[in-house]
Structures are given as structure tokens and as C-alpha cells.
Amino acid sequence: MGEDQDNPQHHNSASEESDLSKEETVSLRRKHIGPSCKLFFRQDPLKIVRGEGVYLYNEKNEPHLDCINNVAHVGHCHPRVVAAGQKQMGILNTNSRFLHDNIVLYAERLCKTLPGNLSVAYLVNSGSEANDLALRMAYQHTGNRDVITLDHAYHGHVISLIDISPYKFDKPGGAGCPEHTWVAPVPDLYRGKYWQSKHPGEDMGKLYSSEVDRIIQEMGEKGRKPAVFIAESLQSCGGQIIYPDSYLPQVYQSVRQAGGVVIADEVQVGFGRVGTHMWAFETYGESVVPDIVTIGKPMGNGHPIAAVITTPEIAESFSSTGIEYFNTFGGNPVSCAIASAVLDVIEDENLLEHAQKVGKILLDGAHRLAAKHTVIGDVRGRGMFLGIDLVKDRESREPHTALAQHILSCLRAERILLQSDGPHNNVLKFKSPLVFSEENAATLLDAIDRVLTQYTQSDL
């Protein structure tokens, strides 16, 4: 008799409540899920069975404060979002080759949140699909193939995006930088190529944008031109980086003059996370209007939906080949109903204003921690996008990776879930659901303070 026949509970469908023990879940995962699919807290992974608001619950029904999920944007299992999906699922779900009101009404509503002539939407299923499609549009519209990306950037898991993601191709086991990918330094004012402290009074945006100008010049010497410059509006995987205000305006101008277009990747940072604006690129001023915007993760609050929004001119270029673009699930009625409900909640619960208010509490609190603990080298953030850069020494700025992991482990013991990231994995990375409260913020800040107060070098 086979293993599964000996244990009937293994026949439960994924949609039914399972009574597998944590050990059995781990065993089945090892057997049937690819080993490159990694878990948080690999030595002692969490088994999460339920979510509500800003909390995730394990198999013991213990709540864990979620400072990780920028996907559950309006809170895990928000009742209005769940109800919208359930209602539409009971009526119709099919592809977008049939006329349906949900896709056109949602596209109209979404485009109205964007500036300039960004008025044509393509609905897809993930941020990776969105960025892949955006690249195809850029190639078609410009006739060029070369891409300028930022160091440490990550734009998705498909081959076309791995090829423009140094976060992947530069890591051990990566294939290295492809011929048509050009990597510009991240405009990181703390530990990038140019430190603000070493260039007092200089326009840091100009210093960093000159690196893109140099790349464009090198392309020209090879008889090539840029197809596209792509960047997250705030770089997340690179360590929660916020660019100098003058950087994107100058880069956009240079790239366009050279015959390219610009993509703003808002997959992680869009939908009001910055608090002051709906889209993070807007925080750099009115002159920063991309040619293509890609969005995803928070769009469906956990349901897989994403989009590319572009101009009529680029959309026309993309259709001029005569090759149809079809996406089986992209823009289906259920996905659009869910995404529309997410916008309802953002508006009705004033989540932009909330993100601005709680984000300030987090940022001010992190600055107070930095004044108290010398292992904090830098604090940076906009709205509910926050990074705390840990160092061994403030003068040398040597990253303190071990301390970051120690903090995450201690927080996990207090049932607070936080991540680290950046090239040295030393930056505490905050990206919770937007409904994170003032009380939640105080809990997180107090816990970090407590760990740092008790910390000694001998701990690591």
C-alpha cells in the first residue's frame, strides 16, 4: 500500500481545511515542491493557516504581526475584497475576448489615477508578466534592444527580466550581465558610488544621472541606442533606496533624447504606499511622468492581477505588428471585481492619509532609535516604505549583516515578522499592509529598541 493510502488525510483538497501536522507539511513540501522555492525562516519555517488585517496566524492560532506583506495591501482577507470576488465568481468568470463591464470600468478608473497621457491599460496576472510585456512594448516602439537598469534591481522571474535584474544575474550561480543590458549605479546617497557626505553641496541627482549619460554614450560608440530605462520608483531589493529628487527627471530626459522610453516599476511601491501620492514616481515632482508604468502585487490584495499602463502612441506601436496580444486570465471579471474593491477600500478608508501618518511615526521612531544605537547607520523612508541600514561602524559604514539576522530572529520569537534586504542583506525592510496601525508601529519600534539595547557583539 502506498504512503498516501496509509494516511487518508493526505487526500484533502487544497481548498479544504487540512489537519496535517507541521512536520507532515514540511515532509510533503520537500518531496513535491522544487528545492529552489525557498521559505522564510528556513531553519524553523512558519506554517501560516489564516490571515486577518495585519496579522498572520500559525497552526496554533498564534497571531504574528506582519511587517512583510506589501501584497495584502488593505489587510489580509479584507471582507469587502473577499465579498467582491465571491459575488463575481458566482456569476461569471471568463476571458477578456468577450465584452464585459468589469474590465473597461476598472481600466478607466485605474488610468484616471495616473498623470499625463497614461491612458491605455493591459491587464495581466503578475508583476513579472507586466514587466515582460512592458519590455516587449519598448522594443517594438523604439526598434532598439538595449536596456538600462539599476544595479541590485529585481524586476521579475521570467527569462527576459532575469536578464535585466542584477539582483539575480550577479548573484552566485547567475549567468552574468547579458550583452544588451547596461547597469547603472543605484543612486544610493548612503552607500552608493557617490556618498552625499563626500560631495557636499553637489547635485547628487546629476552625479548619478551622468552615469546613465555615460552608458548612452558607450552605446552610441557601438552604433546602438537605448530601448528603455527601467527602475523601481523606490528600489526595494537594493535596500529601500530613495533617489535624489533631481535624478529621474534628468535620466528620463537623457533616455528620451537618445531614442528610448522609460518604465516606472511600481509593482512593490504603488497604490499609495508612499502616502502623499498614489504612485511613488510622483514623489519626485510633476516632471516625472513615465512612458510605461507597471503595477502588480497590492493590486488584488493577494489575488493575482497586474497591469501595464502606457500612452496611446506606444499602444499603437505595439499593435502595428498585427500580432494579437491575448492573456487567458488577464482582466477576467473576477480579478477586475477584486481589484476594483481594493481601490474602494483605499479610497473609503483613507489609506493614503493613513500611510502618511503611520509612516511618519515609523520614520521618526527609527530616527530616534538611530540617535540611541550607533549600529544604525542610516534611516530612509517614504510613507510605509522604510529601511534601517545596520552597520558595524558609522565611520566606515561596514554593513552588519549578522546583526540584521539576529534582530529578525529575536522579533520572530516575539511573533513579529520582518525582513532584511540590500546587497549586504543588512537593511531592515518594512513593507506591511497599509492598515498597520499606530499601535502596531509602537510595538515594532519598541521591539527593535529592546533587541538593540540587549545586544552585545558576543551575541553574534
Image (spheres, rainbow, N blue to C red):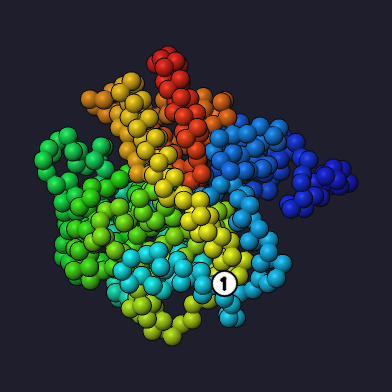
| Residue at the farthest right position | 1
Where does the image place residue 192, in percent across and percent down from the top left? 25, 41
Q: Residue at coordinates 60% horizontally, 81% vertically from top-left? A: 98
Residue kind at label 1, given as amino acid type: Asn
Q: Residue at coordinates 38% horizontally, 84% vertically from top-left? A: 320
- Quick check: can you spot residue 349? yes
The quarter of the picture where the C terminus appears is top left
Q: Identify the residue position indicated by label 1 in the image.
A: 102
Where does the image place residue 74, in percent across and percent down from the top left? 53, 50
Taking 288 as reference, is 141 above or below it?
below
Nearer to the camera, 395 or 201 = 201
Taking 353 as reference, is 181 above or below it?
below
- Quick check: can you spot residue 427? no
333 left or right of 409 in image: right
Where does the image place residue 282, in percent across and percent down from the top left? 31, 56
Where does the image place residue 363, in percent across and percent down from the top left? 36, 35
Near mark 1 (Cα within 10 A), the count class, few <14, some 14-19 or many ≥20, is many
Q: Residue at coordinates 11% horizontally, 40% vertically from top-left? A: 201
Secondary structure type for disc 1: helix
Nearer to the camera, 109 or 178 = 109
Q: Residue at coordinates 34% horizontally, 63% vertically from top-left? A: 263
Nearer to the camera, 362 or 197 = 362
11 left or right of 49 in image: right
